[in-house]
Amino acid sequence: HRIIGHTLDNDSRMATVAPVVNRKNRDTLSLPLRHIRLNRDGRGEHAISQVPLDFDNVELRYSLTHGPGRWSAGVSYDSRAILANTDTRLRGYLRWQQGF
């Protein structure tokens, strides 16, 4: 079987606490804190880890409306490297989206 839409399957767990600040001008600032347990039983093929893996994640996100679209930027940090062939713990992104 193949996971579609999320990296968690039925033997994984994620707990999240995410304070969010919404401003009058529709800007949004959030700070999700997550504890993740992937592939808890260590069986089967998992998209990220073939062995049980526990880690924590923190992400800082900021979004603002500008013209017809919305800009978002964020940076996240994992307590351990989770992707194969890398020791990267810090990631960032910049996104622009427009609704219809």
Image (tube, rainbow, N blue to C red):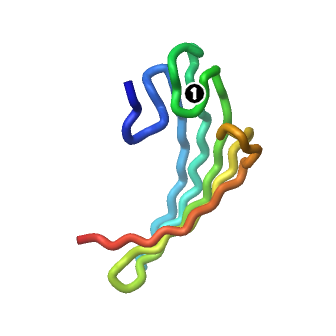
Q: Is the C terminus in the top left, top right, bottom left or bottom right quadrant?
A: bottom left
Query: Which percent across, then down, holds residue 26?
Result: 41, 74
The image quadrant that residue 86 belongs to is top right
Tell me which residue sits at (64%, 54%) in the image: 76
Looking at the image, residue 3 sits to the left or right of residue 41; the answer is left
Q: Nearer the viewer, residue 56 or 45?
A: 45
Q: Nearer the viewer, residue 58 or 50?
A: 50
Q: Badge 1 is on which residue?
A: 38
Label 1 residue SS: strand
Tell me which residue sits at (38%, 41%) in the image: 5
Count the numbered circles shown. 1
Query: Which percent across, then down, holds residue 12?
Result: 51, 25
Tell me which residue sits at (65%, 40%) in the image: 83
**Residue 27 visible, this angle:** no
Q: Give above or below for 51 relative to 62.
A: above
Q: Identify which amino acid the numbered label 1 is placed on.
A: Leu
The image quadrant that residue 38 belongs to is top right
Q: In the orientation shown, which residue stands out farthest toward the left?
A: 100
**Residue 58 visible, this angle:** yes
Q: Label 1 crowding class (10 Å Cα cut-off): few <14, some 14-19, many 20+?
A: many
Looking at the image, residue 83 sits to the left or right of residue 71; the answer is right
